Amino acid sequence: MSETVTVRQNTVVAAVIGLGSMGMGMARSMNQAGLDVVGCDIEPAAVDRFVANGGRGATTAIEAATDADIVVSVVVNAAQTEAILFGPDGIAGTMKPGAVFISSATMDPAIARDLSRRVEACGHHYLDAPISGGAAKAASGELTIMASGSRQAFELARPALDAMAAKVYELGDAAGAGAAFKMVNQLLAGVHIAAACEAISFAAKQGLDLDKVYEVITASAGNSWMFQNRVPHVLAGDYTPLSTVEIFVKDLGIVQDMARAERYPVPLVAAALQMYLAASGAGMGRDDDASLARIYALLSGAKLPDASGGSQA
């Protein structure tokens, strides 16, 4: 990996922890906006790719965060976020005093509130800032960010937010609200993907021309953003992961836990979650979430396209 270069003077320094499909785009967007960005990931190759595109690299989260004014955490879940902050090699005790920690992971709002309290007790600021938009919008700096936190946290995070997002919704002055908004989004996204996969597999079972089904439905009232976005994966027989099945195993599980605690019924979430669990159990957990169509096909004998142009059950 390339050697870490000297911090540029009089420039906002941002650390990005997690250079996956989302984090890489977010880091590059900030770099292109003029921030001095250092990236860190458990995969050295990801750091090398970021360095090759003009960023700086670090081998550990502590190294990345030590001189940063802004730390952006782009990891999978609350457990990984807590480990970055308070684990054996956690950064909470070594971050620059007064720096802001931007948490982008989807998590239970109660956990976001707890992490915020603990980070602030260490003399830092915490912005609860889940993201939406996918890898393409991360790369173009056009994410939607659902954020909540103190006014000072927003002010300190502004250079990063402006670089990463087309829309930043300021949803409250305390952590937890951003996380709650994200869970509403994930409820809808998870159910809509399941519905889209159910519909296109149902069409296949009827022996319909699936390309024509896509054309008709996307021009009709039954269309949804998820149908329009995910069904092309099914038509191409290409389940290369852009958003994995496991993401919705996690996120709809969080929604169910939140709903159970509030004694709130979520029957559509429950039904959709069973399909994600079935796909994961069938070995598709790391495949694209459009793989739910394959589960419907397996259960029904419907024939879906495969990558070679043929069909598969």
Image (tube, grey):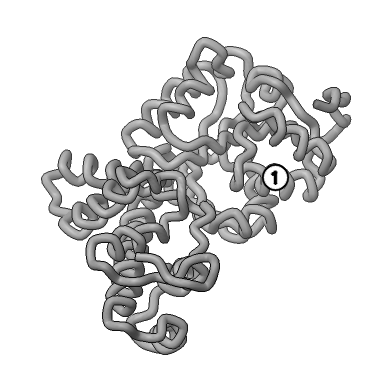
Number of marks present in the image shown: 1
Quarter holding the C terminus is bottom left
- The vertical placement of 37 against 196, above or below, is above
Crowding around mark 1 (Cα neighbors within 10 Å: few <14, some 14 to 19, many 20+) is: some
Residue pictured at 63% horizontal, 22% vertical? 61
Q: What residue is pinned by disc 1?
A: 159
Residue 305 picture location, percent across and down: 45, 71
Residue 86 picture location, percent across and down: 48, 16
- The vertical placement of 303 against 268, above or below, is below
Q: Is residue 53 left or right of residue 75?
A: right
Quarter holding the N terminus is top right
Residue pictured at 66% horizontal, 20% vertical? 60
Residue 245 picture location, percent across and down: 40, 49
- The vertical placement of 58 against 167, above or below, is above
Residue pictured at 26% horizontal, 51% vertical? 273
- Residue at the outermost top position: 88
Amino acid type, mark 1: Pro
Q: Is residue 285 left or right of residue 84?
A: left
Residue 47 picture location, percent across and down: 72, 33
Q: Is residue 56 left or right of residue 237?
A: right
Residue pictured at 25% horizontal, 56% vertical? 272
Seen from the viewer's position, the closer of residues 157 and 80 is: 80
Question: Secondary structure beneath disc 1?
Answer: helix
Specify whether residue 96 is in view. no
Specify whether residue 279 is in view. yes
Q: Is residue 180 left or right of residue 267?
A: right
